[in-house]
Amino acid sequence: MELLKIENYKKSFGATEVLKGIGFSLGRGETLAIIGSSGSGKTTLLRCLNFLETPDEGRMYLGGKLLFDASGPRAGDAEIREKRLHFGLVFQNFNLFPQYTVFENLCLAPKLLATERPDYRQKKDVYLAEIEEKAAGLLEKVGLTAKRDAYPCSLSGGQQQRVAIARALANSPDILCFDEPTSALDPELTAEVLNVLRSLASENMTMIVVTHEMKFAAEVASRVIFMDEGVIAFDGASDEAFGENCPNERLKSFIGSIEK
Ligand SMILES: Nc1ncnc2c1ncn2[C@@H]1O[C@H](COP(=O)(O)OP(=O)(O)OP(=O)(O)O)[C@@H](O)[C@H]1O
Ligand SMILES: [Mg+2]
């Protein structure tokens, strides 16, 4: 079933057109890898999906419902915050809050959100208990229960990234997006983070992963989008992208250049 559909996303920064009409759709439970050379617009696309940038043109549908239309009225801050909740985003550099413990990092946003519920005053204790229970479960899932009360600075990069993944999951997003989640990590820590992604994929979490890890893309992603200068130059099954008979010469040479 189709969960996300993007139509004709365009985004310019000044005179530079970075996204030149991006369109794709994503099924529920799919893992999509986005690959492409530096500057091709991958991060800009993820930021547009997560409402951190506003596309100049285009529409987004989620579960068949229109979630964004560049030609529609401009959404207010509260509306954008609400739309953003459909997406979780994990960055290259973890971006944990350094002044909070691991557990607090996970609970912070859900607790803030809970205060906006109309019955928060009456049900505060129930909501907080639910949030903490969920956070504890997520920490277990990423294998970091023992680090619950640690501060981010005392964790390895791989551990910090696993906390960041758990934190992104704490808001129960429909789609989890990753922007080169392992590029700041050495190979051993990369493996530990990719294992978390693998297990999320096997649980049918819908994911969009911008990555330079071709092996991961080939093994875990069901779909691959290859971006080239702001357009999608290839969109297809990962078997096709990484197979002997890859139909796209630029993609073939890109994969070859990375694997060298
Ligand atoms: N806020 C911005 N203001 C101006 N130009 C920007 C901005 N963000 C991105 N760009 C430009 O848009 C282009 C695409 O950048 P983007 O970060 O999306 O590429 P990328 O595919 O993620 O590259 P990389 O693999 O290096 O991360 C680049 O030329 C970049 O300089
Ligand atoms: Mg980028």
Image (cartoon, helix red, strand yellow):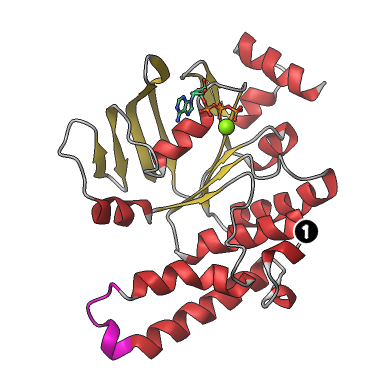
Q: Position of residue 102 (x, y in %)?
A: 63, 70
Q: Which residue is mark 1?
A: 156
241 sits left or right of 184 in the view: left
- State the image quarter where residue 26 is shown: top left
36 within the magenta span = no
Q: Which residues are magenta?
A: 116-123
Say if residue 31 shows up in the picture: yes
121 within the magenta span = yes
Query: What's the residue type where badge 1 is placed?
Result: Ser
128 sits left or right of 79 in the view: right
Say if residue 246 shows up in the picture: no
User: Quadrant location of ligand 2?
Assistant: top right
SS of the residue under disc 1: loop
Residue at (61%, 23%) from the top-left corner? 38
Residue at (41%, 44%) from the top-left corner? 50
Residue at (64%, 35%) from the top-left corner? 211
Of residues 166 and 75, the one nearer the viewer is 75
Task: Farthest residue to the left: give it.
Answer: 73
**In this picture, is 76 found above or below 148?**
above
Residue at (21%, 49%) from the top-left corner? 76
Q: Position of residue 218 (x, y in %)?
A: 69, 34
